[in-house]
Amino acid sequence: MALDPQCLSGRNAVVVGASSGINLGVAHRLGSLGAQIAIVSRSPDRIAAAADALRADGLDVTHHAGDVREATAMQAIMTEIADAKGPIDIVVSGAAGNFFVPAAKMSANAFKTVIDIDLIDTFNVLSAAYPHLKRPGAVLVNITAPQAERAMPMQAHACSAKAGIEMLTRCLALEWGVEGIRVNAVSPGPIADTEGLARLATDAELAKRIRDALALPRFGQLIDIGNAVAWLCSEAASFVTGTTINCDGGMRLGNLYAPG
Ligand code: HXC
Ligand code: NAP
């Protein structure tokens, strides 16, 4: 079912981790459906360039630089956005860092770094937004990954962080639902032309193996994730909370008979 082209008209949306890749695609999709967008990430230059790209497509965008590992930085950004634009309708929390390293060679700080950027940040972002959320009606969407359920070698930190994000999603849905706040997650499979996939599929042969192991043997596109997030944010999903939408081509199914 196609989304109504104005289904997010006037909504005040914040997308965190949106200087590139999947989250930038989500910001573009929410903006194209009528939302006014605030994008957030760590690098001032990269987030400014992303905002310029969105504005070039006619979207209504502000940009804000801050490290998601710093709760006070997220609080200042959410306050700035709410002071300027009013109560926040939509928050997408998707900042992440990842690298592939066997657990036996992973330093304590390497494990902590990914937990901090992927999991602690989700708490920092959502709890910073909480005082400013529109009640009832706000929608929060966390970006997770198939690694939340499916163990992967060299991904002990990311698997643990994403599993934590999915449980945090359910806990906050339970606590905040009574205020009319919905909390969900979207789990992308491998998405073409992204940093995450480049780090996972380091050569063409590995990329082919990953693609052929999917139930739907193609890499996802940015618009696939943009549509999943937009649907969760729309009125069409008004009774949906505490769940993860697996937009992953079937990666979680774990195809034991994959070719190659
Ligand atoms: C082993 C590594 C490492 C590597 C870093 N470390 N890279 N260990 N192998 N390749 C260790 C460091 O030695 C250090 O530990 C600790 O991790 C912190 O490293 P820093 O460089 O100081 O961290 P920081 O500057 O904060 O950078 C974080 C980062 C970086 C994650 C390392 O790559 C980053 O900022 N990435 C953001 C973009 C990104 O990763 N995008 C992909 C997201 S995709 P010691 O002990 O030496 O101090 C994703 C899922 C994809 O999340 C799913 C696909 C299906
Ligand atoms: P990406 O382009 O590298 O985007 C990562 C974003 O996180 C960037 O905007 C980056 O900002 C931001 N970020 C990282 N560390 C930060 C910090 N400490 N503080 C603030 N912002 C920080 O990655 P991607 O591949 O599109 O992935 C986006 C999301 O999708 C992630 O949650 C990832 O786990 C998930 N995912 C991706 C795939 C895939 O195939 N790519 C699959 C499953 C799940 P700066 O540029 O400013 O550093």
Image (spheres, rainbow, N blue to C red):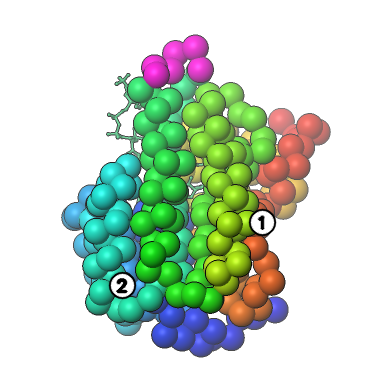
Q: Nearer the viewer, residue 7 or 121?
A: 121
User: Which residue is rendered at x = 43% and y = 70% of the image?
Assistant: 133
Q: Is residue 225 left or right of residue 195?
A: right
Residue 33 in the image: x percent, y percent? 48, 81
Residue 85 in the image: x percent, y percent? 30, 78
User: Residue 231 lies in what quarter of the image?
Assistant: bottom right
Q: State the CA–CA distance, disc 2 to disc 1.
A: 27 Å
Name the quarter where the C terminus is drawn: top right
User: Residue 37 lies in what quarter of the image?
Assistant: bottom left
Q: Is residue 203 visible?
A: no
- Indicate the secondary structure of the residue bearing disc 1: loop
The residue carrying pointer 1 sits among few (fewer than 14), some (14 to 19) or many (20 or more) residues within 10 Å by Cα, namely some
Residue 195 in the image: x percent, y percent? 41, 45
Q: Nearer the viewer, residue 94 or 212?
A: 94
- Indicate the secondary structure of the residue bearing disc 2: helix
Which residue is outermost to the right? 257
Which residue is denoted by mark 1 in the rendering? 243
Pick whichever of labels 2 and 1 is earlier in the sequence.
Answer: 2
Q: Which residues are magenta?
A: 103-108
User: Which residue is rendered at x = 35% and y = 22% of the image?
Assistant: 109
Which residue is denoted by mark 2 in the rendering? 82
- The answer to whether mark 1 is within 8 Å of ligand 2 is no
Name the quarter where the N terminus is drawn: bottom right
Residue 241 colored in magenta in the image = no
Amino acid at the residue labelled 1: Thr
State whether the magenta stretch is mostly helix, strand or loop: helix
Residue 75 in the image: x percent, y percent? 29, 56
Which residue is outermost to the top? 104
User: Which residue is rendered at x = 49% and y = 81% of the image?
Assistant: 8
